[in-house]
Amino acid sequence: MMIKIEIPGRKTLEINYVVLDYNGTIAADGELLPGAAEKIKELCGLAGVFVLTADSYGTAEARCGVLGAAVKTFPRAGAAACKEGIVRALGGGAACVGNGFNDIEMFDAAELSIAVMDREGVCAALLPHADILVRSALDGLDLLLNTERVKATLRT
C-alpha cells in the first residue's frame, strides 16, 4: 500500500505511512472531529495509519483502533522526542499531520508534513517545518485522499 504523489518540477513522494497527532489535530477534547472517522478508515486502505497521542482523555484506542489505525501512546513529558522516534522508526515515506509545538521534530522527520489550524489553533513555531498549512483536519486528510491538491500546492 502506498500513496504516490508526483509533483511537477519536484520529486515524487511515496507515502507508506500517515501519522496523525490526536488531540488538537483529528480530535478535540478526546473525541474525533465529525467526519474524521470515515476519512481515517479510507486512508487505512491506502497506507499504514498511526495515531500518536499522550491520550489525556483515554479515548484514542476506542475511537481510532476500530478504524484500522495503530494507536501509539507515550508519556506527556518528552512527547516531541517520542513522536519523532516513532516516525523515524518507520524508515521513511511518512506523511505527518499535526498542530502543536511537540510536532516539530516529527514534521522534520517526515516526507510530507501538513499543519492543521482547527479548533485548538496551530503553534506558530510549527509553520516553518510544515510543507502545507490547512484550515481543518478534514482538509488535511482530504489532501492525502485527493493528491491532486498536493500537486497543485507544491508544484514548482
Image (cartoon, rainbow, N blue to C red):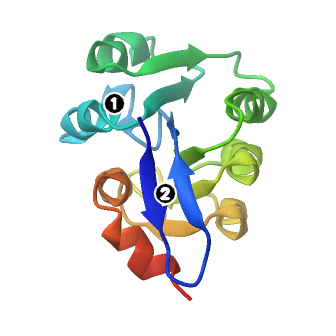
The residue closer to the viewer here, 64 or 5, is 5
Quarter that holds the N terminus: top left
Estimate how packed mark 2 is, as few (under 14), some (14 to 19) or many (20 or more) residues with alpha carbons within 10 Å.
Answer: some
In the image, is 150 to the left or to the right of 16?
left
**From where the camera sits, is residue 141 visible?**
yes
The residue closer to the viewer here, 52 or 31, is 52
Estimate how packed mark 1 is, as few (under 14), some (14 to 19) or many (20 or more) residues with alpha carbons within 10 Å.
Answer: some
In the image, is 28 to the left or to the right of 51?
left
Q: Position of residue 117 (x, y in %)?
A: 45, 60
SS at badge 2 = loop
Q: Position of residue 142 (x, y in %)?
A: 29, 56
Residue visible at 51% across and 47% down in the picture: 15
Residue visible at 33% across and 19% down in the picture: 68
| Tag of residue 44 | 1
Quarter that holds the C terminus: bottom right
Q: Quadrant of residue 140?
A: bottom left
**From where the camera sits, is residue 122 visible?**
no
SS at badge 1 = helix
User: Which of labels 1 and 2 is toward the front?
Assistant: 1
Q: Quadrant of residue 85?
A: top right
In the image, is 31 to the left or to the right of 112?
left
Distance from Cα at disc 1 to Cα at disc 2: 26 Å
Q: Amino acid at mark 1?
A: Cys
Q: Amino acid at mark 2?
A: Gly
Q: Number of callouts in the render?
A: 2
| Tag of residue 136 | none
Residue corresponding to mark 2: 121
Residue visible at 31% across and 18% down in the picture: 63
Q: Which of the marked residues, 1 or 2, is nearer the chain's N terminus?
A: 1
